[in-house]
Image: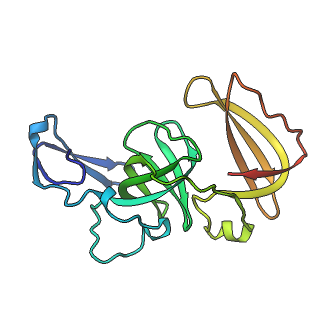
Amino acid sequence: SLVGSRVQVRGTTASHYLSSLRHLTSVAVYAPRPEDFTVIEPEAVDPFTQPLIPVNRVAQYRRGRHAEQRVHVGGVVTLSRAGGEMFIQDDSGGIRIIRADSAASPVGTAVEVAGFVEYEGHLPLLRDAVIRRGAEKPAQVVARVAPVSQILRGDHYGELITLQGRLLDRTTRPGDIDAEMVSSWLVQGDGITFTVEQVENTAGAKLDIPIGSIVSVDG
C-alpha cells in the first residue's frame, strides 16, 4: 500500500482557480497509472502498533511527530452516517472521522482509528481513516448536559451532549440513501435556537411529537 509512504509522482499538472477573485485554490497532479508512483520511503511504522493518542491531543504539538504521519486514536462510535463519516468519543473528547471506505460502524461500537489529521473550520478531523474494531469491551458513552455558554464558545465539539428546549417546527426531506427520511426539528432552548436532524427509515415507526412540546435531545 502507498498509504503513509513518501512517494515521487509522475503525471500531468493542473491549476485550479477561483476566477471571480483571481485566487489560485489548488494545484493537482493527474497520474493515471500505478507505475507513475515511486516509493521513496515507506511508512516507517504501522500506526496501529503505536499507543493510542487521546482525542483531545490530536491537534496538539507532539515532539517527533510529522504532519504526514497517520495518528492512532480509539473510542466509541457516537454517530455514523452514510458515505463513511462518523464521530467517535473517548474519555477526553470527540472527533469527526472520514473513512477511507464507505462502510458504517454501528453506534456504540468500540473502534481504533488510524488517519491523517486535517482541519475544517479550525477544528481537527481524521481523513482517509482505516477503522478496526477495538480490542476492549466498549464503555457506554453517556450524553452530558452542556451549558449554552460553552457551546457558543466552541466547547464540546464532536461530543455526545444533551440539550433541552421547546419544539417550534418540523420539516422532512429525503435522505442520502434510499429508504431514509431526514426530519429537521427546530428547537428553542435557553438562549439559543438549534436544529436537530434525525434520520428515519421510511419503513419504520415515525417519531411524532406535538409542536410546542418541551423536549430533551441527545446528539
Q: For residue 83, say whether it is visible.
A: yes
Whole-percent x, y for residue 29 in the image: 19, 45
Whole-percent x, y for residue 120 in the image: 46, 58
User: Residue placed at 67% from the left, 67% from the top?
Assistant: 152
Q: Is residue 54 above or below residue 204?
A: below
- Please identify the quarter of the rendering in which residue 100 is found: top left
Near-viewer residue (12 or 68): 68
- Please identify the quarter of the rendering in which residue 126 is found: bottom left
Would you say 37 lies left or right of 15 here? left
Would you say 91 lies left or right of 212 here? left
User: Residue placed at 84% from the left, 47% from the top?
Assistant: 167
Whole-percent x, y for residue 130 in the image: 37, 47
- Please identify the quarter of the rendering in which residue 62 is found: bottom left
Color encoding of the figure: rainbow
Would you say 38 lies left or right of 64 here? left
User: Residue placed at 85% from the left, 38% from the top?
Assistant: 209
Q: Is residue 169 above or below residue 173?
A: below
Q: For residue 21, say whether it is visible.
A: no
Q: Is residue 170 above or below residue 97?
A: above
Q: Quadrant of the N terminus?
A: top left
Count of numbered circles in the view: 0
Q: Is residue 64 above or below residue 3?
A: below
User: Residue placed at 14% from the left, 52% from the top?
Assistant: 7
Whole-percent x, y for residue 57 in the image: 45, 70
